Amino acid sequence: MKTFLAKKETVQPKWHLIDAEGVVLGRLAVKAANIIRGRHKASYTPSVDTGDFVVVINADKVVLTGKKEEQNEYMFFSGFVGGESYRSLKLMREKHPEFIITHAVKGMLPKNRIAAKMLTKLRVFKGLAHDHEANNPVKVSV
């Protein structure tokens, strides 16, 4: 028996829906990252993007444990001297809750060229409404 290696042409991506309401951020990010990478499939091949699409709804209702909301900060750099700026997780949650989940999932993807393509398979929305109903996403429990 030969080892099966997936090819880009044979991959048929599916759509998955994750409701972030009441779910801990880390657990949600792990589940989303594994689906995006294709780790849940028998045809998983590390060098080929075999993953599926993930739609996350209710990004503003994700749960953070401990004092993370007050202590964690995101650093941004403009590229100029003295251009570092920091924003707390609490502020980012109010203004851009999609960024929190995207950033967490990005950190759990491999650090290579395929990761940029994989991250495009993640779609995060603030509320219940999303524009991927036509793709019939399958609801995933976390």
Image: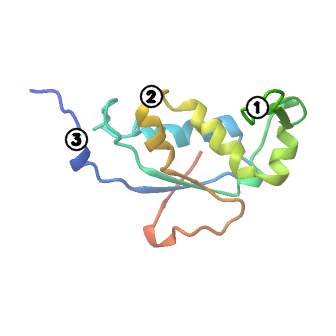
Residue 59 x/y as whole percent: 71, 53
Q: Quadrant of the C terminus?
A: top right
Q: Quadrant of residue 77?
A: top right
Residue 60 x/y as whole percent: 77, 54
Which of the two discs, 3 and 1, sits closer to the camera?
1
Label 3: which secondary element:
loop
Amino acid carrying label 3: it is Lys
Mark 1 neighbour class, 10 Å CA radius: few under 14, some 14 to 19, many 20 or more: few
Residue that appears at 46% across and 73% down: 134
Q: Quadrant of the N terminus?
A: top left
Amino acid carrying label 1: it is Phe
Could you tell me how far apart the alpha carbons at marks 3 and 1 are, in whole angstroms?
A: 43 Å
Q: Is residue 104 left or right of residue 55?
A: right
Q: Which mark is residue 112?
A: 2
Q: How many marks?
A: 3
Circle 3 is placed at which residue position? Answer: 7
Residue that appears at 39% across and 40% down: 38
Q: Nearer the viewer, residue 7 or 86?
A: 86
Q: Earlier in the sequence, mark 2 or mark 1?
A: 1
Residue that appears at 88% across and 30% down: 67
Q: Is residue 127 left or right of residue 67?
A: left
Amino acid carrying label 2: it is Asn
Could you tell me how far apart the alpha carbons at marks 2 and 1 are, in whole angstroms?
A: 26 Å
Label 2: which secondary element:
loop
Q: Which mark is residue 9?
A: none
Circle 1 is placed at which residue position? Answer: 80
- In the rendered view, tell whether residue 110 sits above or below residue 137: above
